[in-house]
Image (cartoon, grey):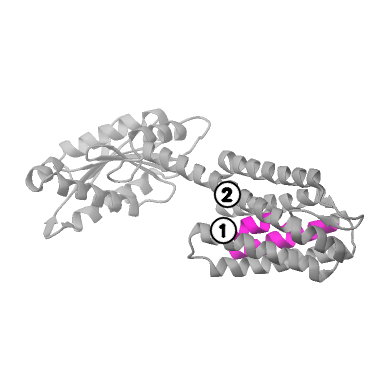
Amino acid sequence: MLYIKEYLVNFSVLITIIYLSGFLYKQFLVNSSKNFIEFSLILIAILGGWCSMFFGIHLSDSVIFDLRFIPIIIAAMYTRNPLYILMIGIGIGLARFTFGISEAAIAGFITVIILSIIGMMVYWISKKWHVYTKMLVVVLVMNSVNSLSIGFLGVIPIADYLSVIVPSSLPINIILSFFLLWMVKDLSDEYVYKTNLLNSARKDPLTQLYNRRAFKHYYELYTSKKKGVLPLSLAFIDIDHFKKVNDEYGHIVGDVVLQKVSQIISNNLRSVDIISRYGGEEFVVILPFCDKENVQRVIERIRYTTETHPIVVDDLNISITLSAGVATSPDIHVKQLLVRADEALYAAKENGRNQVVVANNEGIIQGVLA
């Protein structure tokens, strides 16, 4: 007979683990390194398989029937690395032996390894398929393989296999697999939607750089005692005579110039640097762990690259120059970086533009580079 109560418990456990893994990812893992995120998700998948066995459907004293294959199906559907499917399968297979070594345990290990290999094959075949087509194939193929493996390995009495597994358990497993995959997709889509919504609120729509609101968030973060980043540099960068570009060529061309300058600045910065469009033609950059000498070299390189590479818009070659002001902590108090960098930018404009000016710790502007 089919044990409905145990089935529901098994199913509920997997739902709980899927929800908790989504919560952990959004709250704690999302800002971690890629390797740590992937390792954590593999462990969670193995834990899901083990919990399914722990709350399994006991057909006999040695034979446990459960939904341990569901994490492998989820991995086959959503992983970006097929080797993770095999790693999850091996982990779940080894976890079966925590309930004792028996013929059923060995058969269970073989089954999940077969499922993992099939999952890897389906992954490669279905890479370019529509998500719903892939979901249908993954569920039907892997549930069928799971049932056939159980039958061929012969650890379940043939009477139970023919009367329970094939007519009752297989259809239910297919339905539950679809439901859990749909649940994972819904959680993933919701996260992507919220992330895109958050990014749209923090990004400048024209340049796709951070906007002023996002800059203030990062500025307060990096200048707080909690973050404590030293040395910390800040640079204001302004496009010289940008109004003339708009007046002479039009605002559409001016928008392209802003985009091109944004790309030049971004291409000359590290991934840890924070660049924002502060307003109009003005940009501001936060450079953590960057001292005065290095920030001067970086901003000067940006200025020189812009000056020596005219911006091409259709058949127009537009020469652009930049003025910049730089301030660095601990030479300047961390809370004064914004004001001092702005003063240095003003000095660069007053001194003739197309140059980088550095503020020192005595409030004197120095180090004009051109």
Task: Specify which label sits upstream in the sequence, 2 or 1.
Answer: 1
Which residue is at a point 73% across and 66% down the rendered structure image? 113
Snapshot quadrant of residue 174? bottom right
- Decide whether residue 211 is among the magenta residues: no
Q: Which residue is mark 1?
A: 135
Q: Which residues are magenta?
A: 69-97
Disc tally is 2
**Amino acid found under the numbered disc labelled 2:** Trp
Tags 2 and 1 in contact by the CB under 8 Å rule? yes
Looking at the image, which residue sits at the far left?
A: 248
Tell me the tag on residue 182.
2
Residue ID at (22%, 53%): 306
Residue 72 place in picture, x, y as percent: 67, 58
Across and down, in percent, residue 250 comes to 11, 45
User: What secondary structure is found at the residue carrying circle 1?
Assistant: helix
Displayed quadrant of residue 339? top left
Q: Is residue 370 visible?
A: no
